[in-house]
Image (tube, rainbow, N blue to C red):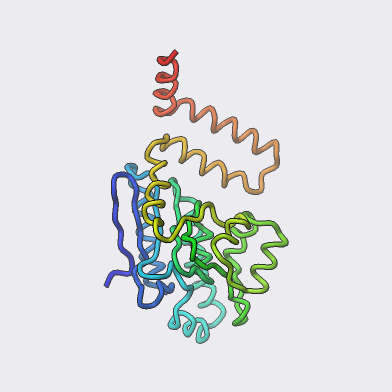
Amino acid sequence: MSEIIVETENSIQTITLNRPEKRNALNDALIHALKAALSAADKDESLRAIVIRGAGKDFCSGADLSALQKIAESDVLENLWDAESLMELFAMIRKLKIPVVAAVTGRALAGGCGLATACDIVLASGSARFGYPEVKIGFVPAMVMAILRRNLSEKKSFELITQGFEFSAPEAERFGLINRVFADETFDADVVNYVSIYENVSRSAVVLSKKLLYQMDGMTFDTALETGAEVNAIARLTEDCQKGIARFLKKD
């Protein structure tokens, strides 16, 4: 059985984590397959957005037992190489040209919650559960912390990563960790409707906007403004912008 299922409809690609019997737990094969699929998608100029979801009841429960056993038996260097594989996945999502949307049902815990957090947009069903329980086994949600700290306040981030409790989708939305909560009964249709927005806006503008937004991390205010001005000038020369201006002027 394939670790993931890749389906494309119109210009939206859905990547489904396909280990439902293991609650879509992360292992080397799944992480490798997901990175390969994202890399291929990044080269496809026809795509407007990517949706990552889980098969079965849960989005992703974190590392599976074999991965935990591997951690316990590996030395420092081996564990570093293993951690860097997941780090590469999180970084790849951020560097991908088009939006990556997590569609979360059931549980997104530990590395699974990290995977959702790493996505540009997080949509969740009303009954979905989230959490970073790593501290309960002496582990640290270390890599996702770089992303979490950019999404939430310092105080809320500290609480979530040092207490390890589960929290609901409505709570996650209130924290600012996820974008939207949809009813369980209509979740699939709501995700399609939400993501289809990217089929009706400029692809080049979205690509430039995503890159600029994340590029601004760590910039001074003046540097961010200067970089924004440069991207603004580039956007004006794109085909989408030229056509958009022409349509707007034609209306008048």
Give the residue furthest to the left: 1
Give the position of the N terminus as an image quadrant: bottom left
Q: Between 220 and 203, which is closer to the camera in this rendering?
A: 203
Residue at 51%, 43% (x, y): give it.
210
Q: Nearer the viewer, residue 237 or 132?
A: 132
Which residue is found at the position 38% from the left and 69% from the top? 30
The quadrant in which residue 64 appears is bottom left
Name the residue nearer the viewer: 19 or 86. Answer: 19
Q: Position of residue 179 (x, y in %)?
A: 53, 52
Residue 115, position as x, y percentages in the image: 49, 63
Side of 134 where 245 appears, left or right: left
Residue 224 picture quarter: top right
Q: Position of residue 15 (x, y in %)?
A: 35, 59
How many labels sit on residues? 0
Which quadrant of the rendered structure holds the C terminus?
Answer: top left
> Considering only vertical position in the picture, is 162 above or below 97?
below
Residue ranking furthest to the right: 155
129 versus 183 height, above or below: below
Percent x, y of residue 45: 34, 42
Q: Residue at x 63, y 58 (%)?
A: 175
